[in-house]
Amino acid sequence: MVAMTTPSSTALAASFCASKEDLKSLSILWRRATGRKGVMSDVGKDKSQKREKRAGKVSTEGSVGVRGKDTRTKDSISTVSGITEAGHHDDNARMTVTMENTYQMGPYKRFPVPAVTDILKDVLTSYLQEEKYEVEWSQKMTKTISEVIKARVKDLMIPRFKIVVLVHIGQLTGQSIQISSRCLWDASNDTFASYSFKNSSLFGVATVYAVYYE
């Protein structure tokens, strides 16, 4: 029989330590020969450099974006225009005139009904005397006559009265017509003037309402 011996734990530990020291010495010699500090250290260094580049890129892009917002031409133009418009509004506010109360409860001058009636007669006669009734023509003519009457009444320079002009033009075919109106106003100051005209073909009625404005 052959006797077999097994190495003790102390011998195994010694051989393991010896092999570990041999590996360290070999790695040191390899580093000196190649001039590197180790593969793992190089990989870590490359990762750190990449992280720094990424961080630097992000910060650069962020700073550029901020500069772009601060130096935009559009913002500068809007700021200048805003200042100009504000100054313009301030000038208008300074030019506003505040009127004091006159405590005037009635007109200094009464509305001249006879003079306005003469204006109505003159305008209706001059515009309708030689005309014949037509639908489209009458629609345009009522507007024209109303504007002419309003302008001539305003030329009288009657203060503190609002003027309302109504003109009606219709065809005469042997019928009768009645035009009436109802108003809510002050009978002591408000008034009106009216005149009607007719020829063989048509009739025209013009009314001017004068409402006193305090």
Image (cartoon, grey):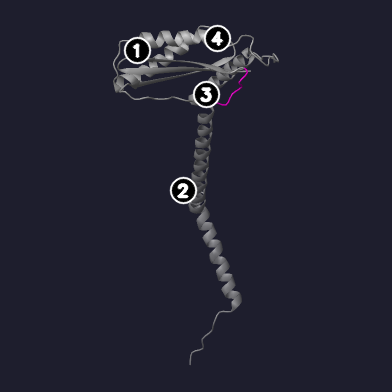
Determine the main secondary structure of the stretch shown in magenta.
loop
**Quadrant where the C terminus is found in the figure:** top right
* Sequence-wise first label, 3 or 1: 3
Query: Residue 187 magenta-drawn?
Result: yes
Disc 3 marks which amino acid? Ser
Residue 63 on image: x %, y %: 53, 34
Name which quarter of the figure residue 130 lies in. Answer: top left
Element on which disc 3 rests: helix
For residue 34, the mark is 2
Question: Upstream in the sequence, badge 2 or badge 3?
Answer: 2
Q: Which residue is mark 1?
A: 128
Labels 1 and 4 touching (C-beta < 8 A): no
| Amino acid at circle 1 | Leu
Specify which label sits upstream in the sequence, 4 or 3: 3
Whether tag 2 and tag 3 are in contact, CB under 8 A, the answer is no
**Residue 78: assigned label:** 3
Place of residue 109 in the rendered image (x, y in percent of width and height, measured from the top left)? 61, 9
| Magenta-drawn segment | 182-188
Circle nearer the viewer, 4 or 2: 4
